[in-house]
Image (cartoon, rainbow, N blue to C red):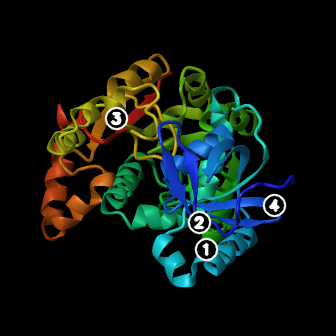
């Protein structure tokens, strides 16, 4: 590594987001400059990771350096040690109560990948949050609600002892629940770290042939078709993320049709551009422009609650995209009057009334027009002949 002309004892460096400079604590070792974000969903860290480079400044020195994600547990521990050595353990714990991404800046910055290399960005983002993913889901009232609704729906729609394909399993918050109900599952995800977390979670709990894991993306479902063959699955599901990371669904539709048995069902959980509770929330925050952010293509990470750019799809769009190969049976809004997961402080304020509100929300989400107006929607489709 060539020498970086930054004083390692400086209190902070500044990093450019393109619009402003953000001051950050940092540490240095022989590999370069080490950074830690204070949240898994920090916008500056996601932007640096996507661009694979960062412009920094300290005093009169301004540099453009290459950037990489640190994924090794040992390297993360060493980075944390260096931060505590520099700033003190108390300050470190206060700043990084929930550490997000660990990044290294070093070397000469290459040109940013074309279109930001979305696939690599996607994989590394989910690799970086895998360790904290269960807490992110299970520690959030609305995220728990989303999963309970989807598992309830799938348990009702998929026959007992079905063989299922899951696209975008993450660390298995739904996978495990369905395994406990006796389903046999081929679970896929783009993140090898997510898959490894799931593997560890189920180790010794279920028969070895009840769960198989494959590293792949939704648009690569052709690999599953090649491996398992046509009509291999009684049902397919993908909830709350994987299909919103696909800018074009046209290629995957015929593949899913081929993978399903006759009359097999496909259940998708999709981030919705039409969300009534988010619109009300933005009006109450005096942010009318936020109402339209979900209609941007893609919805940029600064405007979504996700750590990446995503594509929001409406129920009507999904029904049209899958028509000819699938028949839409029903659509459920999830949730409708309960605000999205990034309003969790508001939701938690009303927890003592949550059971009643949840029952009302569930009822409304099953009926028009509210089933089209949720933060997400669950859509049940059946394979056409």
Helix, strand, or loop for circle 3?
loop
Location of residue 217 (image quadrant) = top right
> Closer to us: mark 1 or mark 2?
2
Judge from the rendering whether residue 128 lies leftward or rightward of residue 158; answer left or right: right
> Closer to us: mark 1 or mark 3?
3
Q: Which residue was labeled with disc 4? A: 31
Disc 1 or 3, which lies upstream in sequence? 1
Location of residue 297 (image quadrant) = top left
**Distance between mark 3 and mark 2 Cα atoms:** 27 Å
At 40% from the left and 38% from the top, the residue drawn is: 270
Disc 3 or 4, which lies upstream in sequence? 4
Q: Residues within 10 Å of mark 3 (few under 14, many from 20)?
A: many
Q: Which disc number belongs to residue 205?
A: 1
Q: Residue furthest right?
A: 1
Disc 1 or 2, which lies upstream in sequence? 2
> Closer to us: mark 3 or mark 2?
2
Judge from the rendering whether residue 163 lies leftward or rightward of residue 367; answer left or right: right
Disc 3 or 2, which lies upstream in sequence? 2
Q: Would you say the residues marked 3 and 4 are in contact, meaning their CB atoms lie under 8 Å apart?
A: no
> Closer to us: mark 4 or mark 2?
4
Q: Which residue was labeled with disc 3? A: 272
Judge from the rendering whether residue 327 lies leftward or rightward of residue 82; answer left or right: left
At 35% from the left and 63% from the top, the residue drawn is: 140
**Distance between mark 1 and mark 4 Cα atoms:** 41 Å
Q: Which disc number belongs to residue 249?
A: none
Q: Residues within 10 Å of mark 4 (few under 14, many from 20)?
A: few
> Closer to us: mark 1 or mark 4?
4
At 74% from the left and 69% from the top, the residue drawn is: 75
Q: Which residue was labeled with disc 2? A: 131
């Amino acid at each position: 590594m060539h020498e970086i002309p930054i004083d390692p004892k400086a209190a902070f460096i500044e990093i450019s987001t393109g619009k402003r400079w953000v001051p950050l604590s940092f540490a240095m070792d022989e590999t370069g400059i080490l950074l830690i974000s204070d949240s898994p969903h920090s916008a500056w860290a996601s932007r640096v990771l996507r661009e694979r480079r960062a412009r920094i400044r300290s005093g009169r020195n301004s540099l453009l350096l290459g950037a990489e994600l640190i994924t090794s547990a040992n390297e993360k521990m060493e980075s944390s040690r260096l931060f505590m050595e520099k700033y003190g353990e108390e300050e470190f714990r206060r700043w990084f109560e929930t550490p997000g991404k660990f990044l290294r800046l070093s070397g000469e910055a290459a040109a940013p990948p074309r279109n930001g290399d979305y696939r690599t960005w996607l994989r590394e983002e989910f690799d970086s949050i895998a360790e904290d993913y269960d807490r992110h889901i299970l520690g959030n009232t609305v995220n728990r609600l989303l999963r309970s609704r989807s598992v309830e729906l799938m348990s009702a729609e998929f026959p007992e002892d079905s063989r299922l394909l899951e696209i975008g399993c993450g660390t298995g918050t739904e996978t495990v629940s369905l395994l406990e109900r006796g389903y046999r599952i081929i679970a896929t995800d783009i993140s090898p770290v997510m898959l490894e977390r799931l593997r560890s979670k189920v180790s010794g709990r279920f028969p070895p042939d009840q769960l198989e894991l494959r590293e792949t993306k939704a648009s690569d479902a052709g690999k599953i078709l090649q491996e398992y063959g046509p009509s291999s699955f009684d049902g397919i599901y993908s909830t709350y993320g994987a299909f919103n990371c696909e800018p074009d669904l046209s290629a995957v539709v015929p593949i899913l049709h081929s993978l399903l048995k006759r009359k097999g069902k496909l259940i998708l959980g999709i981030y919705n551009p039409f969300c009534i509770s988010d619109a009300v929330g933005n009006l109450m925050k005096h942010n009318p422009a936020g109402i339209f952010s979900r209609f941007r293509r893609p919805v940029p990470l600064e405007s979504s609650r996700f750590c990446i750019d995503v594509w929001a799809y409406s129920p009507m769009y999904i029904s049209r995209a899958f028509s000819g190969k699938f028949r839409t049976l029903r659509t459920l809004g999830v949730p409708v009057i309960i605000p999205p997961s990034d309003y969790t402080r508001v939701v938690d304020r009303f927890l003592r009334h949550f059971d009643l509100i949840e029952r009302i929300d569930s009822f409304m989400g099953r009926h028009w027009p509210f089933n089209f107006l949720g933060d997400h929607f669950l859509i049940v489709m059946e394979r056409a002949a």
